[in-house]
Amino acid sequence: MDFEKTNMTEEPFSPADDFPDEDTLCDLAELFKIFGDSTRCKILYVLASGEQSVGDIADTLSMTQSAISHQLRVLRQSRLVRCRRSGKTMLYALADDHVRTILEMGMDHIME
């Protein structure tokens, strides 16, 4: 980490008495673990362009539908992805703009 570029006057967290409890910090760590898998990140980037079916995602990423379905289940359980039925097809999308923001901020950070 380049400490010279770090602005030490900024306070990213609340005062110590408002420090998150252990359960909340564990939940945060679990959320970041979800982003620790490149396949899940690829799926999230595909979904950033709009709703997609499992087949469409699989085609875009040249992966099997089974592999995509497994990762979508993880993403849904983590509330990063939502789905809706359209006829016989399930369509998947990012759960909300927070997910897009996390992806964008992560990319901004690594591209610095």
Image: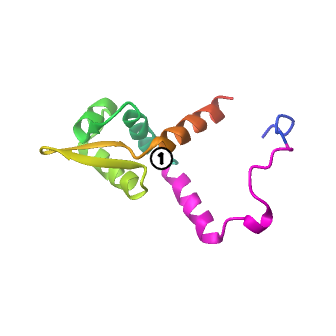
Relative image position of residue 81 (x, y in whole percent): 38, 48
Viewer-nearest residue: 84 or 65: 84
Q: Secondary structure at mark 1?
A: loop
Coloration of the structure image: rainbow
Relative depth, front residue between 11 and 23: 11
Magenta residue span: 8-34
Q: Residue furthest left?
A: 88
Identify the residue at the far bottom of this view. Answer: 22
Above or below, 78 against 110 in this view is below
Residue 48 position by quadrant: top left
Kindly identify the residue that appears in the image at 79 percent across and 61 percent down: 15
Give yes or no for residue 24 being in the magenta stretch: yes
In the image, what residue occupies the spot 51% across and 47% down? 35
Q: Residues within 10 Å of mark 1 (few under 14, many from 20)?
A: few
Q: Quadrant of residue 8?
A: top right
Q: Position of residue 107 (x, y in %)?
A: 58, 33
Which quarter of the image is occupied by the N terminus? top right
Q: Is residue 18 magenta?
A: yes
Left or right of 40 on screen, residue 7: right
Tell me the residue at 28%/36% (across/down).
52
Is 69 positioned to the left or the right of 31 in the image?
Answer: left
Q: How many marks?
A: 1
Instruction: Describe residue 5's horizontal placement relative to residue 20 as left or right.
Output: right
* Residue 72: x %, y % from top left: 34, 49
Query: How far from the left and from the top, in percent, is residue 112?
Result: 69, 29
Residue type, label 1: Asp
51 or 65: which is nearer to us?
Answer: 51
Quarter of the image for residue 110 reads top right
Q: Which residue is label 1 attached to?
A: 37
